[in-house]
Every structure is written in structure tokens, then in C-alpha cells.
Amino acid sequence: MNFVNLSRMPKILILLVHPALEKSKANQMLLDSLPLSDNITLRDLYEEYPNFFINVKAEQELISSHQIILFQHPLYWYSCPPLMKLWIDMVLEDGWAYGPGGDKLLGKKWIQVITTGGSKDAYSKGGFHGYETEEFLLPFRRTAELCGMHYLNPFLVQGTFQLNEQGLQKESKRYSDFIDQLLGGIYE
């Protein structure tokens, strides 16, 4: 019989940031594929803060008790939804997340799970958007690095507008496997 030491498994905080989750079949299927684990905390920021009044201290306490901070969101206008930007601006305070005394995030991991309507080809040098998705994420990488966090490669689900049921199921399985790897301490 194999026993898993749950105390050694990293705790993952999934910050879901989608302003129209009910319209996103891709994000719904990703969420439905999450493995059941006491080491995963799911927090829907649009449900938690519909009026955009963020409880900074509560968010900081939550982050403090997790080793992996995972933002799940669509790519909106080459960035993140507005509540995620506000969350970053408010919660990652000088003196707490960075700057003198700002050491609360040192060594934690930052990951983004991003859905795009456009295909991988559309997000390429010669594609419609002219750049790869990762290039649009540079401000997030720099934010993580400023806070002393390890920025991990994003998990991308691209071309969601064209995905059929089988494609969505394949991406959901890939996501579930990805989360299992994170819980097992395997990072890319």
C-alpha cells in the first residue's frame, strides 16, 4: 500500500479571474477537471468581489498559506481581465510583496492558466497578433520576479473558439494532468 505525505505536497491557490465564466465552456471544463485535493484552494475573484472592493489582508493571508499561486483567466486585449490587474495592484503591496520588508512571496511559484480564442498560429510572429502569447505576459513575469517569486511557463489553451467537445475534453485532461504534476512537485 502506498501512502502519500500530504504535508509535503505543495498547496495550490487557484485564482479564477473570468468576468463571464458562464459563457466560457473552455474554462468551465478546465474547472470541472480539477482533481479533488485538500491541497487545492479555488477562489473565483469575480464571485468574491463583484464590486471590485478587494479585501487586501484576507487575500494576503490566503497567499501566505500556499506555495503555488495560479491565475486562471482569459487573455483580454493582450492582458488580463480588469479585476486581476486591480488584485495585483492592491494585494502585492510595497513592504509586503516587494521592497524593504517585502519578502512574503519569496520562493513561491507564479503560474498562469490562460485561454485564448485565437489559435497558437494567430499568436505567433507571422500570425494575426504578431507576437507569441508569452510575449504579452512579460509584465506578469516581471511582477513575479520583483516579488521574488519563480515565474513558471504558462499553461495555454489556445483556439478555444474552434475547439469541439473532443478538443475541450483533451485540453481538460491535459489540465488535470498538469495540476497533478504541480501537486507532485513537478514544475516546468
Image: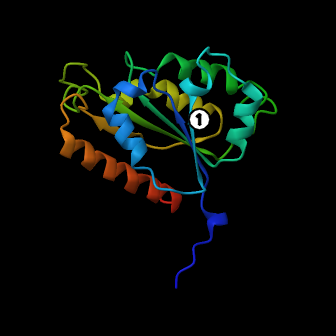
Quadrant in the rendering for residue 136:
top left
Question: Is any part of residue 87 visible from this angle?
Answer: yes
Quadrant in the rendering for residue 153:
top left
Q: Residue furthest front?
A: 22
Q: Looking at the image, which is closer to me, 56 or 111?
A: 56
Quadrant in the rendering for residue 150:
top right
Count of marks placed on residues: 1
Dot 1 surroundings within 10 Å: few (below 14), some, or many (20 or more)?
some
Q: Position of residue 73 (x, y in %)?
A: 44, 30
Q: Of helix, strand and loop, which one carries label 1?
A: helix
Q: Residue at x 62, y 71 (%)?
A: 5
Q: Position of residue 179 (x, y in %)?
A: 45, 53
Q: Which residue is mark 1?
A: 145
Q: Is residue 79 above or below residue 172?
A: above
Q: Looking at the image, which is closer to me, 133 or 17?
A: 17
Q: Residue at x 59, y 35 (%)?
A: 145
Q: Residue at x 20, y 19 (%)?
A: 128
Q: Position of residue 127 (x, y in %)?
A: 18, 23
Q: Residue at x 38, y 37 (%)?
A: 28
Q: Residue furthest right?
A: 101
Q: Is residue 142 left or right of residue 90?
A: left
Q: Residue furthest bottom?
A: 1
Question: Is any part of residue 105 visible from this angle?
Answer: no
